Image: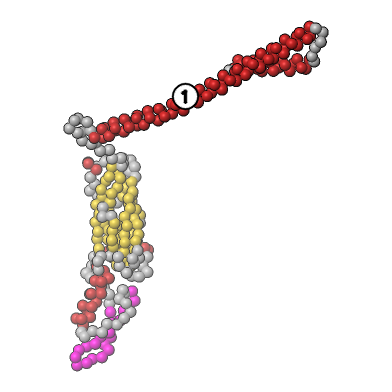
Amino acid sequence: MIGFDVAIANRTSTGVSSRFRRRQGSPIPDREFEICNGVEAADRRRRYQSVIMISGGLLKIYPSELKLPFEMKKQSSCSMQLTNKTDHYVAYKVKTTSPKKYSVRPNMGIVQPRSSVSITVTMQAQKEAPPDLQSKDKFLIQSVAADEGTTTKDITTEMFNKVPGKVVEEFKLRVIYIPANPPSPVPEESEEGGSPHSFMLDNEVQSSTLLDAASRSLEEPSREHEVESLAQKLTEEKKYALQQNQKLQQELELIRKQQSRGGGFSVSFVAVVAFLGIIIGYLIKNT
């Protein structure tokens, strides 16, 4: 409870005028309230506390349900966000009905005015799945107004005890399991006995086949043209090689005749002509 020192300033015939001063650690600002009697002072004090403690709630919690992907023998995690809706420090604490099953980081702390904190909930790897993936686990988030400058180290269990004149907000969240690998939905069959999905697949296959056929029909003329051009080029090269071969044979015959008459060419010239004949013969053989 917040204590006050009452200093009587003066007395008049119409009533009593009192002045209230703040004690150290009180959330009441350092100002004076001029009142006519003690009842009015108590009313003002209660109204001020209600503005601090419960005006619109202390925290906004999102989401309202914890959805965890469930997969056998694997951990899964989700997060939630706490947003301070007031202009004062707010202390929070997270509890669960299955503390050995879940890990909460951080499980307590301070949310500064008009700011947010993120909390991660991790479910340990489970050996068995609950029936129909229905979870009975729940989480409880408690929050109270704290003095300015309060840190996580200053948080105690007694801060969240419910006593007269103190507001402790509580928010409950249930756990929902989501299949990690949900099965794909199977569409209902149509009246003709086939499913709409299979009908769409058939149409896609037919469209793909038509497109492939059209593309092949467009490519075939260009390929035929390339083959004809290549064949014509090879034919011309072969014809040229044959002509060169005949020419070389004629030259060799002329050399033999000249040698038989007593004349002759140099050995180097004969070697060059022979080498050219070998190369041309090799080209003709490959083509």
User: From which residue to which does the magenta span run?
Assistant: 4-25
Q: Is residue 83 magenta?
A: no
- Residue sitting at x 37%, y 63%: 153
In this rendering, the answer to whether 273 lies above or below 161 is above
Q: Report x, y in % for residue 45.
A: 24, 77
Tell how many labels.
Answer: 1
In this rendering, the answer to whether 275 lies above or below 209 is above
Where residue 255 sits, quadrant-wise, is top right
Q: Is residue 251 left or right of residue 174?
A: right
User: Farthest residue in the top direction?
Assistant: 260
- The quarter of the rendered structure image containing the N terminus is bottom left
In this rendering, the answer to whether 24 lies above or below 276 is below
Q: Is residue 66 left or right of residue 250?
A: left
> Which residue lies under the disc numbered 1?
224
User: Farthest residue in the bottom direction?
Assistant: 13
Where residue 170 sits, quadrant-wise, is bottom left
Q: Which color scheme did the rendering employ for the protein?
A: secondary structure
Q: Is residue 14 magenta?
A: yes
Q: Report x, y in % for residue 6.
A: 27, 83
**Do we see residue 15 in this rendering?**
yes
Q: Is residue 283 left or right of residue 125?
A: right
Question: Amino acid under label 1?
Answer: Glu
- Residue sitting at x 52%, y 24%: 229
Q: Nearer the viewer, residue 270 or 262?
A: 262
- Residue sitting at x 25%, y 38%: 185
- The quarter of the rendered structure image containing the C terminus is top right
Q: Secondary structure at mark 1?
A: helix
